[in-house]
Image (cartoon, rainbow, N blue to C red):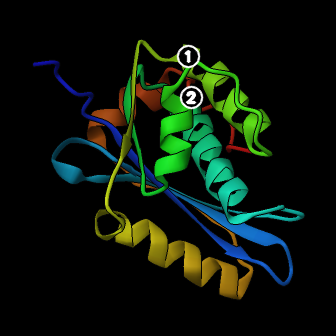
Amino acid sequence: MEALPTVKVHFDAMFNKKTFKSVSEVVVWGLRDKLLASKMILHNNVPSPFAAKAYAGLEAIKLRILMGFQEVQIKGDSRTVIRKCQSTKTDRLAIGAIIWDIRSKSVHFQKIKFQDIPKIENSRAHKIAKEALASGVTSYLVQEDPNLQNLFSEGRWGRRPD
């Protein structure tokens, strides 16, 4: 059986169909499910709930690249987005360009696994995204972890994520 990467990234999104705004929530978990980072991003002019979920998946990839880890599990409760990220076929749906961005950024990892999870396992990311969409506030948090200090000191975290 293949060993899974120890760093897990859960992503979720909330979509407001009246304003076409969405919030992407990304939560990064390390060993023993220690919270390493959390990021909320507000998006404007989002065409659909599927696009909102795809943008959240893209934000998960971007955050992982900035944190410098080489192996990662990307987990979300959007089966459609996860399956499209796992596939090598060209996607012709409206979210195709976002999926292409996710796949093109995946080459930054030695090992990456996309996994569909039940909504109940993604409840923390879902709750935070829902609150952020209601308030319109975005945030970024990195937990201090002594095991990661050498990573930060090497300059791999040189700037805040986009």
In terms of depth relative to the viewer, which is nearer, 10 or 98?
Answer: 98
Residue 37 at x, y percent in the picture:
45, 52
Q: Which amino acid does label 1 sit on?
A: His
- In the depicted structure, whether residue 52 falls above or below residue 75: below
Q: Is residue 141 left or right of residue 115?
A: right
Residue 91: name its quadrant. top right
- In the depicted structure, whether residue 134 falls above or below residue 27: below
Residue 157: name its quadrant. top right
Task: Find disc 1 in the rendering and name its residue.
Answer: 108
Q: Which mark is residue 65?
A: 2
Q: Which amino acid does label 2 sit on?
A: Ile
- Residue that sits furthest to the left in the current view: 1
Quadrant of the rendering where the N terminus is positioned:
top left
- In the depicted structure, whether residue 151 falls above or below residue 147: above
Mark 2 or mark 1: name the one nearer the start of the chain.
Answer: 2
Q: Distance between the residues labelled 2 and 1?
A: 7 Å
Judge whether residue 107 can be spotted in this image: yes
Residue 21 at x, y percent in the picture:
80, 72
Q: How many neighbours does mark 1 have within 10 angstroms: few (below 14), some (14-19), or many (20 or more)?
A: some
In terms of depth relative to the viewer, which is nearer, 77 or 59?
Answer: 77
